[in-house]
Amino acid sequence: MDSKTYNRLVGQIARLLAKSNTIAAMEAFRRHSDIPINGVIEPGSLTWQALLQAAGETRTEPAVCT
């Protein structure tokens, strides 16, 4: 893939993400919880813990689907 095509595709993906209601909701949740917005939600992170607390969960590790 040439760089022009790559840049066009990345731009399209970025525009879709910018319009995402899920992204907007997570950013609002982080702002409300005073958690820095970095675009990543990792198990065990501040965001992960805050989401579990908000959902009333006590588990701190991600559920494993089998």
Image: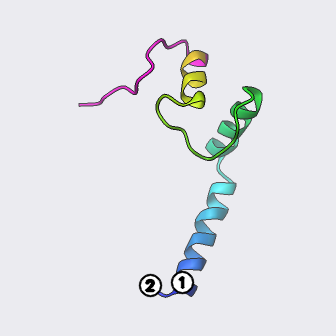
Query: How does the figure colour the protein chain or chains?
Result: rainbow
Mark 2 to mark 1 CA distance (whole Å): 6 Å
Magenta stretch prevailing secondary structure = loop
Q: Quadrant of the C terminus?
A: top left
Would you call the spot at circle 2 few (<14 residues within 10 Å), some (14-19), or many (20 or more)? Answer: few
* Label pair 2/1, CB-CB below 8 angstroms: yes
Residue 11, compared with residue 37, is above or below; it is below
**Which secondary structure lies at badge 2?**
loop
Is residue 22 inside the magenta stretch?
A: no
Question: Which three-letter amino acid code belongs to the residue tagged 1?
Answer: Thr
Question: Which three-letter amino acid code belongs to the residue tagged 2?
Answer: Met
- Which numbered dot is residue 17? none
Looking at the image, residue 64 sits to the left or right of residue 52; the answer is left
- The range drawn in magenta is 54-66
Would you call the spot at circle 1 few (<14 residues within 10 Å), some (14-19), or many (20 or more)? Answer: few
Give the residue number, with chain letter if any, for mark 2: 1
Name the residue rendered at 63%, 71% in the picture: 11
